Amino acid sequence: MSALPPTSREWHLVARPQGWPTPGDFALRETPVTEPGPGRILVRNLHMSVDPYMRGRMNDVKSYIPPYQLDHPMDGGAVGEVIASNADGFAVGDHVLHGLGWREYADVAAKHATKVDASLAPLSAYLGVLGMPGLTAYAGLFEVASFKEGDAVFVSGAAGAVGSLVGQMAKLRGASRVIGSAGSDDKVKLLVEEYGFDAAFNYKNGPVAEQLREAAPDGIDVYFDNVGGDHLEAAIGSLNVHGRATLCGAIAQYNDTEPAPGPRNLALVIGKRLRLQGILVGDHAALQPQFVQDVSGWLRSGELKHPETVVEGIENGVDAFLGLLRGENTGKMIVSFTR
């Protein structure tokens, strides 16, 4: 094996955020790099993902995924190049997807790494459109929300990594109308002019319920929720009888210090016979082959766009994450390593 770098920089959580995280809640530290043990590989990370769900892992509460430990490296999706291997089936130079992001070099159990092909798509795409966000959009729309041709679809957080794909997938499968909400006029313009949404609105420009009714006067059949709060309440009001909602995220509430009130119009769920269902992407692994087949076809044809916001340098990883929470990204937020 070739000489290894002596150290790796990695981000640690050093304090549990109270409300909005601050840079002081994190520390960038150096740790030694050693040869991988049996059944393990050493990966030089090239791109890492920052995602909204990571905010929940900073709280010491029981959830579907363990919380981050204080004074330990955080983790998350990453893609990189194998620089040392002590595992069958992996060679130096292979590119792999794995779950030990937030660090420059990752000592990964080979059973938790997946080879990816840089000739089929840019490596960062395996953290976005061909990765967890892409499968979340696909499963949430087609399996959880039972989308069918002719449905009218509303997507909140529609300029984000998941939402931007949901709207495009709905159009590709014959939605009668796709509406999106976003947090700036530039993003609204992008949704309509670049991603083919039929209508979009800036939720900061007025009450969401009013803007949604104007954009979808005949109501909606499917709601894909990435925001929660007033967006969910507005969607319940606009959903037609037997409408379906996929509850994917509630980024509007992630940094609240007090419990958020529920929608005030939940009684409408009864009369309209609505179905509101949460999604965890790990429950939908069986869709992976069909997902890859469909999405790779859309990518080859140019029908599906997958925007990325790229922040350079591991030292800017926390800034990228905080920017994500503030909605500064368009599409998938990626941190690329240049060292």
Image (spheres, grey):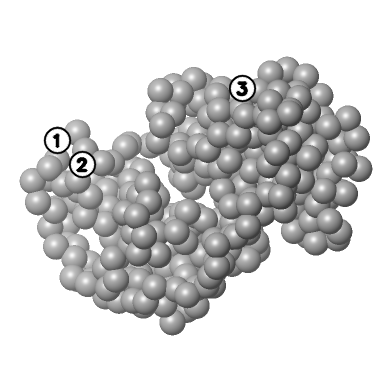
Q: Earlier in the sequence, mark 1 or mark 3?
A: 1
The three-letter code of the residue at mark 3 reads Ser
What amino acid is labelled 1 in the image? Asp
- Position of 95 compared to 253: left or right? left
Q: Is residue 50 visible?
A: yes
* Label drawn at residue 146: 3
The residue that mark 2 highlights is 110
Q: Which label belongs to residue 88?
A: 1
Q: Nearer the viewer, residue 15 or 135?
A: 15
Q: Is residue 68 above or below residue 13?
A: above
Q: Quadrant of the C terminus?
A: bottom left
Mark toward the start of the polypeptide (1 vs 2): 1
Would you place residue 13 above or below residue 241 in this image? below
- Residue at figure coordinates x 13%, y 53% from the top left: 36
Asked whether the beta carbons under mark 1 and mark 3 sit within 8 Å of each other, the answer is: no
Q: Residue at x 65, y 38 (%)?
A: 224
What is the distance, in whole Å, between disc 3 and disc 2 at their CAs?
Answer: 36 Å
Q: Residues within 10 Å of mark 1 (few under 14, many from 20)?
A: few
Q: Are marks 1 and 2 in contact (CB under 8 Å)?
A: yes
Which x, y percent locates residue 91?
22, 41
Label 3 neighbourhood size at 10 Å, few (<14), some (14-19), many (20+)? some
Percent x, y of residue 6: 19, 71
Q: Is residue 164 visible?
A: no
Residue 66 location (% of width, % of height): 31, 54
